[in-house]
Amino acid sequence: MTTPPHSIGYLDRLSAGRTGVGPLAGYDRSATANPYASLLVHGASGIGKTMIARNLSRKYAPEYDPASGITSTPLLLLQAPPAPDERRFYLHILAAVGAPATALSARAQNVASLEVRVIALLRDLGLRMIMIDEVHNLLAGTHREQRRFLNVLRYLSNELEVSLVCLGVSEAVDAIRGDIQLARRLDEHHLPNWRDDAEFSDMIQTLIAAMPLEKKSNLKVKSFKQILALTGGVTSRIFALIKDLSIYAIVTGDE
């Protein structure tokens, strides 16, 4: 079974369609003062943060060892709850790892008991990293609720001795910086919108090559500029536009 290396620089190398994350390459927590150094990836909506998280989650999916009867989960991907609610977050974790139901209803379980149960279960998974997508959801809560939620994230990282990767829109950065201890631990990396450069050209060519087109694309430099102008350099919009253009070319017979 493949497990996540100490370096989390692989975030850029494994992100399909999002190759421009150069500063992440070489990020090695073993080279930092904090052995559980973590990362905050932020950028515009649709820029590719969730894509990165899902790619990693698939690569390091849980794996069952029939010899030992143990399921190892090196990476746990979670989506932040709609609002910074500790109890709801712990319940999301239990659901994500397929925890068996208890005699008590979810409503009857208090935060303290959920916390103990979550820690106990996650310890047994061989966990190395927790990824929290949509972390900007914490902005839906009050300042006090935000601080409590950030305390939970820091507590999980400390208690389980795992790295933490948070992904969200840039508006969440200031809120996360409100927890000084967590902010110090999270190295910030901004995912920029695509620009008119060789990297963008390579991505477009790779995307077009994956489409079921018989004729070779003859996109010119002007075409790349038009794509950027129409999409604002946002990954999801670029993908949708290329898909729509490919469908149009097939339907009309132009390709």
Image (cartoon, rainbow, N blue to C red):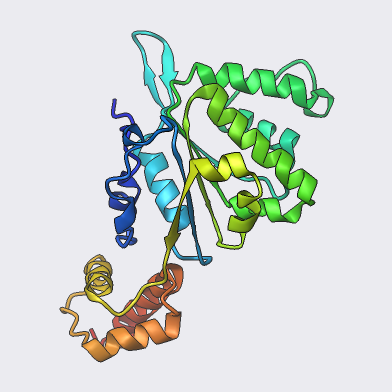
User: Which image quarter holds the C terminus?
Assistant: bottom left
Of 95 and 44, the residue lying toward us: 44
Residue at the extreme top: 68
Residue 24: x percent and y percent? 33, 51
Q: Residue at x 39, y 20 (%)?
A: 64
Task: Give the residue furthest to the bottom.
Answer: 222
Which image quadrant is residue 115 in?
Answer: top right
Image position of 67 (left or right of 180) = left
User: Which of the pair 241/253 is nearer the observer?
Assistant: 241
Asked if residue 121 is positioned above or below residue 38 in the image, the reply reads: above
Residue 216, above or below 157: below
Q: Is residue 89 above or below residue 170?
A: above
Q: Toward which corner of the image does residue 230 lie, by quadrant?
A: bottom left
Residue in front for this viewpoint, 21 or 200? 21
Image: 19 above or below 56: below
Q: Residue furthest right?
A: 108
Total marks placed = 0
Q: Is residue 47 visible?
A: yes
Farthest-out residue, left = 216
Image spot of residue 29 (x, y percent): 36, 36
The residue drawn where x is 71% and y is 23% is 114
**Rendered location of residue 45, percent (x, y):** 53, 65
Coordinates of residue 202 in the picture (x, y in percent) = 22, 70
**Res. 92 visible in picture:** no
Residue at x-position 44% and y-position 37%:
37
Query: As drawn, is 74 to the left or to the right of 134?
Result: left
Where's the N terminus, which quadrant? top left
